Image (cartoon, rainbow, N blue to C red):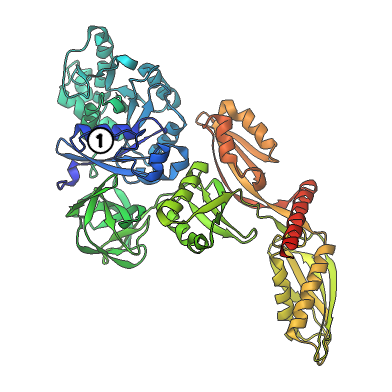
């Protein structure tokens, strides 16, 4: 692939609801520009952008792939971004490094939940965008209905058709180009006359297009209002300015899988979308404060790492966006985030799994680097003498968790490393050890997301894992003040053991544990306080009710007895432990459960159903609001009731409901539920003891 300067580059994110035809569209781009000799199919697992084993198996995109397309002496970097809501992190990361987006909409379904979510992210990043009403050759395809759904769901946006379909459903043959007022059948490389039955509609739509173009520039508006005709070049110029300013959104039509109407879309990308230098400048944080970075080869080197993958054969592959400066092969670069130098070999341009070696990447371009040692996603690379930082992507918080267990002893040794590497590839995945339940917790955005992560651990890193619903990390505490006492006396022929401890236990709302004393006189030496505390801390991890960690307890040692010969630290450690156990039983012990703060956004029509469902989950609803035609419900709900809420909410709302949650506090478990939890623990404990015998 030849070298392209900044002005000849376009970075475009392909986004939309899952199944709206993004991957097939990329195949058509590659085929029509001669990059591949035949179009692959998602159903056959032969597409360039869906090269991952999981993508082939599931027949959906699960990670963002970079597909550069050479067209009209331009390099168009298309990012094929997953559309299923489980992979929302990929949308955030991919749209962070492009200047524009193409939003694909299914001609039958119209706007779907995935369309709304990616639209919000495009708004967040202030990206100019085109809409493609795709799959126009499907049964029941309807251009007008799909266009109306766009206007209905996004009332703040103005949608301007740039094309009309040349027929619909099985009769879809290509597009009517409203700029040239020509019919462009097939892939769009030939022009013909507009059929008589479409002329009136085309002329009316053309007026709307020219009006939108005139509004893009004051001089053009003045000329247009003065009754003068705008030239084709003037229409293109004004239209481009309107698109880049976000004044309106152009609408195109195609059937990517059958390669109909594809070339006019590539023309539109070159014609209407900004190159990196024309996009909003980046705000970087330097030594002297914030500075504005334009995409310029002459600027300071600023390279942002937006994605990292692990290849079993190549090793670590780092995906970068050059925001400023030129990144050359065979050079050294400084990782400002980690404070480490990296040696760069060949700079590559990815096309799916293929890595095409190049000499350099100009400002604004996307590429890959192999085998960097310290660098990970979110890092900024550049010149050591010119430190820069940029705002990183704010990834959504995890919504779904599983407990993972290794299937074999060999898997156990490698599990932590494998999970860490899987999470490095996808920053919306996390893993941690939950000390309260002694489980390894693996968290993500949904069941599919987690399943992909587990399978990657197996296929890429050779670790087989089984999963189950995580145990709820309950806690135990006391509700009243009590005194406790224990004498430890042991005589075994030689020197014995003796230690007697008297303590008071009190609820401690603002801290997990506090140990202090009120000793007076010489009954008990303060030298024995550390072993007493050690003994107590040894049993804090497993409370008497359900074996859960004990919290919010204050212990005050106020007296005791010691023996001049037999008192030893171990004796007081034992006495302290046993006194604490007795005190726990007498101090009104209760179970505590984690409560999450939930924010649920659903269509207004689903509000009643969702609230009714939340009430069955012991929710305390704290607020209801309206936000851009949606209902927003805030509630506090016990974690035990919403471990699988992401799946349940999608089912209730047809996929249109979304939510976020964060830990709020611990609360006492209602007694009837606590009894069942305690009984289950005692049964499990008894079973374990019998097994060990």
Q: Give residue 56's position: percent from left, percent from top.
A: 38, 40
Q: Is residue 524 left or right of residue 645?
A: right
Q: Give residue 437's position: percent from left, percent from top.
A: 64, 58
Q: Give residue 539's position: percent from left, percent from top.
A: 72, 69
Q: Is residue 492 left or right of residue 313?
A: right
Q: In the picture shown, does residue 579 fall above or below 191?
A: below
Q: Is residue 462 visible?
A: yes
Task: Name the residue at 30% across, 14% down.
Answer: 171
Q: In the picture shown, does residue 528 fall above or below 59?
A: below
Local SS, label 1: loop
For the residue pair 183 and 302, the one nearer the viewer reads as: 183
Q: Give residue 593's position: percent from left, percent from top.
A: 69, 52
To which quarter of the image does residue 291 belong? bottom left
Task: Name the residue at 26% across, 24% down.
Answer: 260
Mark 1: few/some/many CA within 10 Å (<14, 14-19, 20+) = many
Question: Dividing the image into 4 quarters, which one contains the C terminus?
Answer: bottom right
For the residue pair 60 and 466, the one nearer the viewer reads as: 466
* Residue situated furthest top in the rendering: 196
Q: In the picture shown, does residue 675 fall above or below 259?
A: below
Q: In the picture shown, does residue 328 fall above or below 647?
A: below
Provide the residue designation for mark 1: 273
Q: Is residue 302 left or right of residue 418?
A: left
Q: Is residue 412 left or right of residue 258?
A: right
């Amino acid at each position: 692939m030849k070298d392209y300067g900044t002005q000849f580059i376009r970075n475009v994110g392909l986004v939309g609801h899952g199944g709206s035809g993004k991957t097939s569209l990329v195949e058509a781009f590659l085929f029509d520009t001669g990059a591949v000799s035949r179009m692959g199919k998602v159903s056959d697992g032969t597409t360039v952008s869906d090269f991952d084993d999981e993508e082939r198996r599931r027949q959906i995109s699960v990670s963002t792939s970079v597909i550069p397309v050479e067209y009209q002496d331009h390099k168009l970097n298309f990012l094929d971004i997953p559309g299923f809501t489980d992979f929302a992190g990929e949308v955030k990361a991919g749209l962070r490094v492009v200047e524009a987006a193409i939003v694909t909409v299914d001609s039958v379904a119209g706007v779907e939940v995935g369309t709304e979510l990616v639209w919000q992210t495009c708004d967040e990043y202030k990206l100019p965008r085109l809409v493609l009403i795709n799959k126009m050759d499907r049964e029941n395809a309807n251009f007008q209905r799909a266009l109306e759904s766009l206007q209905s769901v996004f009332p703040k946006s103005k949608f301007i058709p740039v094309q009309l379909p040349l027929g619909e459903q099985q009769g879809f043959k290509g597009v009517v180009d409203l700029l040239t007022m020509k019919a462009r059948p097939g892939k769009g490389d030939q022009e013909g006359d507009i059929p008589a039955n479409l002329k009136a509609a085309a002329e009316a739509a053309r007026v709307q297009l020219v009006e939108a173009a005139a509004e893009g520039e004051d001089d053009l508006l003045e000329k247009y209002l003065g009754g003068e005709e705008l030239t084709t070049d003037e229409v293109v110029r004004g239209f481009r300015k309107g698109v880049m300013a976000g004044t309106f959104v152009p609408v195109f039509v195609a059937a990517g899988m059958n390669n109909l109407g594809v070339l006019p879309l590539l023309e539109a990308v070159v014609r209407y979308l900004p190159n990196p230098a024309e996009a909003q400048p980046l705000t970087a944080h330097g030594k002297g404060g914030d500075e504005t970075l334009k995409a310029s080869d002459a600027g300071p080197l600023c390279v942002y790492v937006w994605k990292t993958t692990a290849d079993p054969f190549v090793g670590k592959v780092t995906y970068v966006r050059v925001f400023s400066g030129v990144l050359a092969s065979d050079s050294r670069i400084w990782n400002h985030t980690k404070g480490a130098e990296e040696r760069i070999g060949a700079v590559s341009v990815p096309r799916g799994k293929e890595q095409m070696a190049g000499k350099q990447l100009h400002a604004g371009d996307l590429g890959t680097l192999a085998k960097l040692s310290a660098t990970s996603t979110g890092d900024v690379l550049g010149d050591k003498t010119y430190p820069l930082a940029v705002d990183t992507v704010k990834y959504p918080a995890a919504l779904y968790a599983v407990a993972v267990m290794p299937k074999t002893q060999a898997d156990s040794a490698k599990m932590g490393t494998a999970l860490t590497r899987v999470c490095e590839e996808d920053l919306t995945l996390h893993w941690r050890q939950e000390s309260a339940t002694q489980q390894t917790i693996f968290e993500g955005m949904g069941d599919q997301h987690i399943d992909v992560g587990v399978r990657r651990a197996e296929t890429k890193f050779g670790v087989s894992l089984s999963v189950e619903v995580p145990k709820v990390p309950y806690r135990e505490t006391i509700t009243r003040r009590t005194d406790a006492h224990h004498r430890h006396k042991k005589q075994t022929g030689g020197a014995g053991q003796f230690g007697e401890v008297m303590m008071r236990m009190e609820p401690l709302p603002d801290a997990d544990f506090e140990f202090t004393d009120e000793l007076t006189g010489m009954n008990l030496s303060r030298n024995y306080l550390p072993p007493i505390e050690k003994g107590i801390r040894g049993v804090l991890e497993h409370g008497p009710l359900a074996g859960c960690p004990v919290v919010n307890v204050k212990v005050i040692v106020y007296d005791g007895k010691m023996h001049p010969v037999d008192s030893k630290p171990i004796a007081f450690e034992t006495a302290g432990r046993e006194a604490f156990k007795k005190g726990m039983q007498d101090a009104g012990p209760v179970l505590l459960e984690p409560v999450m703060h939930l924010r649920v956004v659903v269509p207004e029509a689903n509000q009643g159903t969702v609230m009714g469902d939340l009430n069955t989950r012991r929710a305390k609803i704290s607020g209801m609001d309206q936000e851009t035609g949606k209902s927003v419900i805030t509630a506090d709900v016990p974690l035990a009731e919403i471990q699988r809420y992401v799946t349940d909410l999608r089912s209730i709302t047809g996929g249109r409901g979304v939510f976020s949650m964060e830990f709020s506090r611990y609360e006492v478990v209602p007694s009837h539920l606590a009894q069942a939890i305690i009984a289950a623990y005692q049964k499990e404990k008894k079973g374990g003891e019998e097994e060990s015998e």
